[in-house]
Structures are given as C-alpha cells and as structure tokens.
Amino acid sequence: MIRVIVADDHVIFRQGLLNLLQSSDNITVAGESGTGPETISLVMQGKPDIAILDISMPGLDGFEILERIQSMGTDTKVIFLTMHKDALMAKKALQSGASGYVLKDNAFEDLLYAINTVSTGGKFISPSVLESVIKVPLSEDKSSPVLTLREREVLKLIATGLRNKQIAQELFISIKTVETHRTNIMQKLDVHSTASLVQYAISTGLLEK
C-alpha cells in the first residue's frame, strides 16, 4: 500500500481528495492537515511514502514544507497540488525536489496516476502545463550527446502529446520514419513507453532552462 498524507487548507476540497484516495485499492491515507506546521508533524510522526501539498498554506508554504521534509532525511516524496499554472512555478517545484506537480483543476483526473508514478520513482506534471515546461534543446549539447537533432525534435513532439501521424505531418516525414526515431530514442534512453519518455523529459535536462 502507498501511504499518503494530504495537506490543504481548503477543507471541502481536501475532503473530496480524501474520498478519491480512499476509493483506491493500493492507497491508504495516513493523515490530513490544514497548515504547514501540522504537515511537518504528520511527516515526522508517520513518515508517509508521499505528501500531497498545496503550495499556498498557512504557517509554512509548500516549498518551505518540502525543504523541511528534505532536511529530515526521510524517504517521503512530495507532490505539489496547486492552482498555479505558471510553467516557471512548475519548473521551480521540480528543481526544488518535488516529484509531482498537479493542478487543482485536474486533480481528480491526474492525482491517482501521479501517486502511482511517483511511488515507483517517476515524476509527474499535469499535462495542461507540461507543454509549456518541456523544451528539448535543439543545439548540440556535449553533456548529453545521446540523441540526434531529429530525435530531439521527435521527442519534443512526443512529450507534448502528439501521435505518430501528427508528428509525421509536423516534420514532413513518413509515419514509418517517426516510428523508427521513436524506437531509437527508447533504446538510447532505455525507456519502454510513451509515459516513460514524458517522465524522462521532466526529470532530466529536457526542461526549459
């Protein structure tokens, strides 16, 4: 079972999330809180697998809570749950050590998937902000020479949600060529699904600088 806590100062919204989580067979709710200090106490006492945090919280904000959790040396991972659709905020969250960034607008659609992704070591960001966050560098990067220029272009389009046919139309190449590039990218990066490609883009140097 994945043990989670939920920290959000809006009681009605928090209760809705708790109902959602409790309906899942592989998730158990280890606690809930409405303030930053309460959240720190919950993490210290319960050491949950995942802490779901609103960024705007009384007492301590989500980033301060994340910093405290990291200083504890626990294995608790953090998913930010927020109204902020700003790509810079999402990038800051991931760079600060958060494992997920879920918009409240999409919480009920994305949260269960985010929890399962994060619990297995992946990272998750709501698709509606993903496109504005991810940027595959088109110049040659000697620190990461794995992909060719065309493969980077294909990966960028995969990460933004396009299907093979759409990518082919965008780049004026055949669908078979797209499939070949996709296969080569997966082999080079040692990932095995489209979801893994997207998470790779989030968790590595493919984020917008």
Image (cartoon, rainbow, N blue to C red):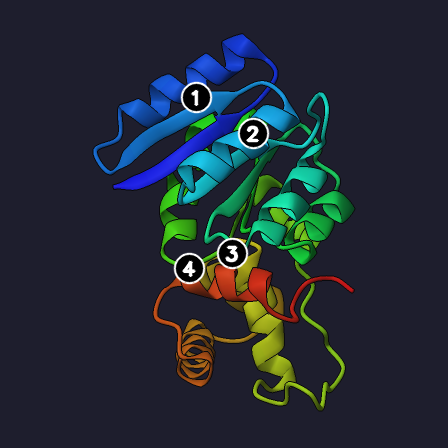
Q: Which residue is mark 2?
A: 39
The correct choice, above or below, for 110 with respect to 168 in the image is above
Q: Which residue is mark 3?
A: 162
Q: Earlier in the sequence, mark 4 or mark 1?
A: 1
Report the Cα–Cα distance between label 4 and label 2: 22 Å
- What kind of element bears circle 1? helix
Q: Earlier in the sequence, mark 3 or mark 2?
A: 2
**Labels 3 & 2 near each other (Cβ < 8 A):** no
Q: Position of residue 14 (x, y in %)?
A: 50, 17
Report the Cα–Cα distance between label 4 and label 1: 22 Å
**Dot 2, crowdedness within 10 Å: few (<14), some or many (≥20)?**
many
The correct choice, above or below, for 69 with respect to 61 in the image is below
Locate the C terminus by quadrant.
bottom right
**Labels 4 & 1 near each other (Cβ < 8 A):** no
**Dot 3, crowdedness within 10 Å: few (<14), some or many (≥20)?**
some
Q: Which residue is mark 4?
A: 121
**Image side of residue 59 versus residue 148, left or right:** right
Of marks 2 and 1, the one in the foreground: 2
Q: Position of residue 20 (x, y in %)?
A: 35, 22
The correct choice, above or below, for 183 with respect to 104 in the image is below
**Dot 1, crowdedness within 10 Å: few (<14), some or many (≥20)?**
some
- What kind of element bears circle 2? helix
Q: Which residue is mark 1?
A: 17
